[in-house]
Image (spheres, rainbow, N blue to C red):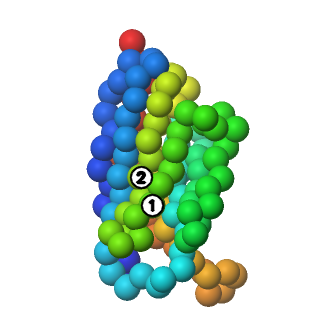
Amino acid sequence: QVQLVESGGGVVQPGGSLSLSCVASGNIPSIYTWGWYRQAPGKQRELVGSIMSLSTTNNIPSVEGRFTIARDNAKNSVYLQMNSLNPEDTGVYYCNLFWGVSSSRREFWGQGTQVTVSS
């Protein structure tokens, strides 16, 4: 079993910055992908960005240039640095870890952490 524990988040004014962290424990293979998701009130959970084993990243257009995802494989951790935050970034942020495809896919989620951007 794999467990993900998130930290960070909080309340910040528009234009501010926050950073999130997520650490995994358990039986994790050497190749896996990290993702960060968020869910705004009344909306579906959406992918914010992902980072693959060789640190190739993909972000959604609305956060490109503002959010940065990084990983530390030695620490089984992923980070999300969020700059120039705006109220539309408010939501619960979840880290996600997965490997495999189709029937062999294994996926795990963090507990979620609240990010609120408000003046």
Q: Earlier in the sequence, mark 1 or mark 2?
A: 1
Labels 1 & 2 near each other (Cβ < 8 A): yes
- Residue at image coords 29%, 50%: 7
Rendered position, 91 above or below 48: above
Q: Position of residue 31 (x, y in %)?
A: 54, 80
Residue 97 in sight from this viewpoint: yes
Q: Position of residue 55 (x, y in %)?
A: 56, 63
Residue bearing mark 1: 71
Placement of the C terminus among the 4 image quadrants: top left
Identify the mark at residue 79; answer none if there is no mark.
2
Which residue type does callout 1 highlight? Arg
Rendered position, 73 above or below 37: below
Q: Position of residue 22 (x, y in %)?
A: 36, 58
Callout 1: few (<14), some (14-19), or many (20+) C-alpha neighbours within 10 Å? Answer: many
- For numbered disc 1, what is the local secondary structure? strand
Placement of the N terminus among the 4 image quadrants: bottom left
Rendered position, 95 above or below 42: below
Instruction: Residue 74: name its quadrant.
Output: bottom left
